[in-house]
Image (tube, helix red, strand yellow):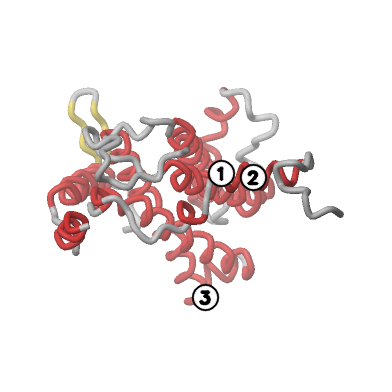
Amino acid sequence: MDQPAGYLHWGFILISWPNLILIGLMVVLFALALILPFPGHRSSIEEEKKV
Amino acid sequence: MSGNITDESTGSWTAAARRQIERRLPWENLLPDRQPFYVGSWVYVFGVVTIAALAWVVLSGVVLAAFGPQWWHLSNAGRFFNSMHFWSVQVFFVFMVLHLWGQYFMASWREGRAPTWMIGVVTFAISIVAAFTGYLSQQNFAAQYIAINAKDAVNSTGVGGFFNVLNFGQMYGLHVMLFPIVVILLVFLHIVQVRMRGVVPPIGHEQKPAVTLNLRK
């Protein structure tokens, strides 16, 4: 932990692995938020339709 | 005083302010018990998680400020609160960026919501400076390393005269007093703006009669 992070150097792109992994996890989390159903969402839509 | 005098007839600024607040932000908008159906999505949770993280940032920061650098570096409890402050900041920024992505792709500045968007942008920018002063306030070698490396870049922007990264007292004062007040105030205004105009509908769901929108009257 107490050492400098490794870096990905690809052309003009230079980014540390921890930052790249974090950005990747954020993209995954964002995609999951779009895909995964929200708890109770279906019943609230049906309730709204009844009203 | 005559009973005929109503709020409308009084010219005082307090009555005018009260009428404005009642008109723009009625209680049913401020504390709603129902939300439109499209709010049932995880994307709408990112903003709330950011607020929760900010609460942890402030609470852990208050404890750190109360006990001081020796405590947060040398005692187990201090290191725990130091870590909690650091990691809650990471959660704050991660979810603020996810919230930004979600609102950007939803074009959340639609239908009179530009002030909400702009307050969010300013909050993001000021949060970055607040975090920067936090890194400078750690009272360790990392803080000194960051300060030495940042000074020329900061001075080149022209703000060095009143924002000296080598001045610990100034950076610490800004970090524990000015920036928390500004960030909390902006987040408060951001939430009030959201409540005034309602949560932004997804593109294509604007102004549908079946949907209860708490839009500005």
Check disc 2 and report the residue beneath it: B19
Check disc 1 and report the residue beneath it: B23
Q: What amino acid is at disc 3? A: Ser
Above or below: residue A49 compared with residue B155: below
Nearer to us of marks 1 and 3 is: 1
**For numbered disc 1, what is the local secondary structure?**
helix
- The residue located at (44%, 30%) in the rendering is B114
Name of the residue lying farthest toward the bottom: B76
- The residue located at (19%, 64%) in the rendering is A40
Above or below: residue B79 compared with residue B205: below
| Chain under disc 1 | B
**For numbered disc 3, what is the local secondary structure?**
loop
Work out how far the residue at label 3 is from the one at label 2, CA to CA, in angstroms.
53 Å
Query: Mark 3 or mark 2, which has the lower sequence index?
Result: 2
The reply to whether the C-beta atoms of the residues labelled 2 and 1 are less than 8 Å apart is yes
Above or below: residue B126 compared with residue B153: below
Q: Provide residue B157's location: percent of width, then percent of height.
A: 57, 23
Mark linked to residue B75: 3
